[in-house]
Image: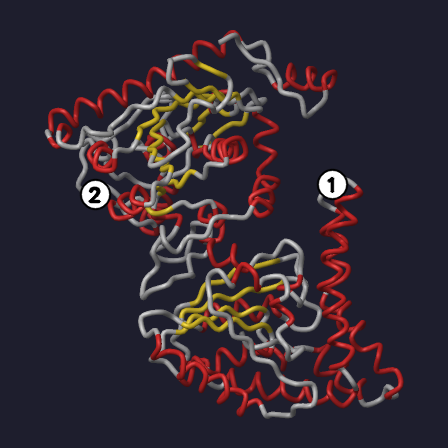
Amino acid sequence: MPPGIDGVGLGLILHHERLGKMFDIWCLHIPVTDRTSFTDLVKLVESTVKLEYPRAPNSPIYLVGESLGACLALAVAARNPDIDLILILANPATSFKRSMLLQHILLPLSNMIPEQLRFRWPYVLSLLSGGPSKMVASTMGKGLPLQQVIGKLSQNSLAMSSYLSVLSDLFTTESLMWKLDVLKSAAAFANSRLHAVKAQTLILSSGQDQLLPSKEEGERLHKLLPKCDIRRFDDSGHALFLEDGISLVSILTATNIYRRGRSHNYVSDYFPPTPSEFQRIHDIHRWLEAVTNPVFLSTLENGKIVRSLDGIPSEGPVLYVGYHMMFGLELTPMVLRIWTERKILLRGLAHPMLFTKLREEILPSLSAFDTFRNLGAVPVTATNFFRLFSSKSHVLLYPGGSREASHRKGEEYKLFWPEQPEFVRMAARFGAKIVPFGAVGEDDIGQILLDYNDLRKISYYKVYMEELTDEVVKLRTDAIGEVANQDFHLPVVLPKIPGRFYYYFGKPIETEGRRQELKSRAKAHELYVEVKSEVEKCLDYLKQKRENDPYRSIFARLTYQATHGFDSEVPTFDI
């Protein structure tokens, strides 16, 4: 890890423990009195890379750098295009020339302020980088109890105090002038060689960087570098890696940039969120759970239906097969609840559009789907299916896919499954349990105004849908019927006063010991039809029972919570 402007790699303080489970970590340390030129620093990092690469030629070497370190990483990559390097660059100092603060204010000011006031430099720079203020604001904004807030601030203060302590030693007037000169030469060196950088690159760009114009620089590099992705942190300052809520491991997982071999393995190269990271994801999406107040039912082995997830198998492999609501609205509350209640992580088989775009035009950037990848979603392929079952995972599959998630008027809760029993034999091969489930509630929060058939009649939207479809990787191109690939589109929906979501997980279907039996096409199809029928029964059960739920309306639920507490479980229909 090439260091930032501090020279000693302080950005590792909050990340080294988890990163150590993924990497053999090396960090370049530049002593306080060292005055090695930038060119020689490049040669030093380069010699280390060349020494290590032959020891594992099938694995990449990651260069993680912020500000100055990012320039070092770019320079080494430009000089070594044949080595498999992956660059993670936070707020690169390649924008130094356009930094009014560093070049036109701090540099002249450093020559004017007396040496006896040098102890003020670290505090000035830390405030400009957003360190202390971001730490306090982030912690206070979580709504934690006072005792937890104090504990969290104390923990983060240790990292910040280390940061300030090191800066106080580093930033004498003379050392500051030298570091600014190094930044200047580093930016010039790296910028002159950007054309030679072939490495896979991830830019981490802060929107509130007071030291460098990192937001604009991130966009510039994203366009210039050939294999470059970008993640934007609009509310973050210069010291990105020292901010609370920033997890480098989560970023590597969400972007699928971490790999042990020559290509990314969506199963073995995945690192699940820590409890705190999962809680952060939960907090972001809690609004949907609050609005829809989901009811979860499952079926025990004896056939009894209970209002809990106790009927879900604990040990994998398990395959969950169900109906996809409009826009997949049921997905996030379900995944979050299963994790919260059972500590089971569902690995969803998802549309390739969450991972790959054929070109950048209309659709949202891939960063919009980072949460799904952080939670373990993988592209729906036979290889990934096999690997997930091999690792005894809990796998989520929607056979109706995007056809159900973008259904037409009057098609609510209608299954659109392919004719072929795509998942039955794979489940039987590993003896996986199949859990059919249904989810209803989409018709209680929105009504389709314009569907696929309506939009195709509007010339503008017809062209728009065709352009959208051209950006998306195609699925089931050889299929026939309704489930076959069609133009990608988003129906126009009129929101309703929210109702309630209901989930029902049926009794698990065993495939253990049936591998030989289900090699028969007829037997496999028979089980496929059984699973489909069970999903339809789950949907019918929920649609019928919700009519008797006195708290189906959000107003009834709010009234109940106002008298019983907003964290109380709202009753539902009798099971």
At 37% from the left edge and 18% from the top edge, which residue is drawn? 301
Q: From what the image shows, is residue 133 above or below residue 194?
A: above
> Compared to 510, does 77 lie above or below?
below
Q: Find residue 194 and report its horizontal and vertical position in percent.
A: 46, 80
Residue drawn at x 50%, y 46% as measured from the top left: 371
The Cα atoms of the two marked residues, 2 and 1, are separated by 49 Å
Q: How many marks?
A: 2
223 or 318, which lies in front?
A: 318
Residue at left 72%, top 17%? 564
- Give the x, y percent position of residue 457: 34, 34
Residue 530 visible in rendering: yes
The nearer-to-camera label among 2 and 1 is 1
Q: Secondary structure at mark 2?
A: loop
Q: Residue at x 31, y 50 (%)?
A: 470
Nearer the N terminus, badge 2 or badge 1? 1
Residue type marked 1: Gly
Query: Which kind of residue does numbered mark 2 sit on?
Result: Thr
Side of 95 where 381 appears, left or right: left
Q: Mark 2 = which residue?
A: 477
Indicate which disc residue 331 carries: none
Residue 504, picture quadrant: top left
- Residue 497: image quadrant is top right
Nearest the viewer among 349 and 52 is: 52
Q: Who is closer to the viewer here, 365 or 64? A: 64
Mark 1 nearby-residue class (10 Å; few <14, some 14–19, many ≥20): few
Q: x, y (%) of residue 449?
A: 45, 26
Q: Which residue, given by chain and number where applicable, does mark 1 sit on?
A: 143
- Crowding at dot 2, Cα within 10 Å, few <14 / some 14-19 / many 20+, comes out as few
Labels 2 and 1 touching (C-beta < 8 A): no
Q: Nearer the viewer, residue 294 or 407?
A: 294
Q: Is residue 391 left or right of residue 250?
A: left
